[in-house]
Amino acid sequence: MVVTGASTGLGAATARALAARGHHVLAGVRRERDGDAIRADGVEPVLLDITRPEHIRALADRVDADDRPLRALVNNAGISVNAPVEALPLAEWRSLFEVNLFGHVAVTQALLASLHRSRGRIVNISSVGGKVAMATYGPYAGTKFALEAVSDALRRELAPHGVEVVVVEPGAVRTEMGERGAATARDLAGKMSPEHRRRYGGLVEAVVAHSLAFTRTGLAADKAGAVVAEAATARRPRTRYTIGRDAGLLTWLARVIPDRALDRVAAASLRKYWPREAA
């Protein structure tokens, strides 16, 4: 098994859950000290920044050199960026897509030969944001919508060859990613032009406050990791798994109510989080 982005949170929980099921896990970490924190029986940290081709080549060589077949690749690495479409510099857009989309494609391409040999499985960690894009979630949701599309195409391409593709769509999960995302959003907001701050400052503050409250009531990382482990190992997996009732509810709402109605629901959910002066 290979799990990318396994330093903390959902990735680390997934690595532990897979190891508990008797699998040997190559857990991708970006720093050596992160590897020391998650090293355990069945969990072998490997240095992996999925935006660096030399790291991906080294991972593929490590997999090829192992006598054990590669049963699954879990593409979990990711970063969260919340900013208005108008205000986020293109360089930030490109960096986000490099990690959340192109890096996953690169790792998948590098390991597909091994997965073909084992008739293994690819598990792509998307998000409820891969189904619904709320205000300021355009950059992040854009990467997840794209990952959903790539996953659908890949599933249909690989099915005749015995390789399965599964998508996992988490809602709120209690991990460090929420706090890091909030810090990033505030940092980006601080760099906005005065005009953009007048236009979007209150919205960004409301979204950050809503997101933090949402995350604090989310599913524990270990429970979410168990769902990912099930997606990676089930004999007959579903094509999609949602994590958390919030994810199931929001994706259902997006299917059954008109866009304008969903816009009003989204706006209402933010109302109490607006700073008083902006409201």
Image: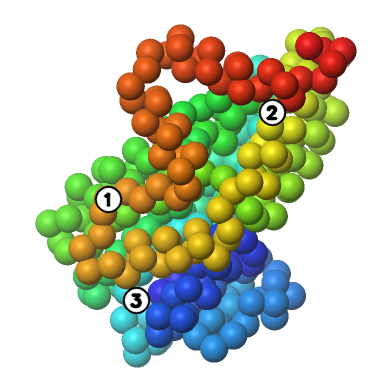
Residue tagged 3 = 70
Quadrant of the snapshot with the N terminus: bottom left
What residue is drawn where x is 33% and y is 22%?
256
Q: Quadrant of residue 229?
A: bottom left
What residue is drawn where x is 37% and y is 31%?
252
Q: Is residue 13 visible?
A: yes
Residue 22 in percent (x, y) is at 40, 85
Question: The residue under label 2 is which amino acid type?
Answer: Val
Numbered disc in front, either 3 or 1: 1
Could you tell me if the residues under marks 3 and 1 are in contact, i.e. CB atoms within 8 Å?
no
- Label annotation for residue 207: 2
Q: CA distance from mark 3 to mark 2?
A: 40 Å
What residue is drawn where x is 47% and y is 17%?
262
Eyeballing the image, is 145 above or below 116?
above
- Label annotation for residue 255: none
Q: CA distance from mark 2 to mark 1?
A: 31 Å
Helix, strand or loop status at disc 2: helix
Q: 10 Å neighbourhood of mark 2: few (<14), some, or many (≥20)?
A: many
Quadrant of the snapshot with the C terminus: top right
The one of 189 and 248 positioned closer to us in this rendering: 248
Helix, strand or loop status at disc 3: loop
Along the polypeptide, which appears first: circle 2 or circle 1?
2
Residue tagged 1 = 239
Helix, strand or loop status at disc 1: loop
Q: CA distance from mark 3 to mark 1?
A: 20 Å
Looking at the image, residue 221 sits to the left or right of residue 75; the answer is right
Residue 240 in percent (x, y) is at 32, 48
Residue 90 in percent (x, y) is at 64, 28
Residue 191 in percent (x, y) is at 83, 27
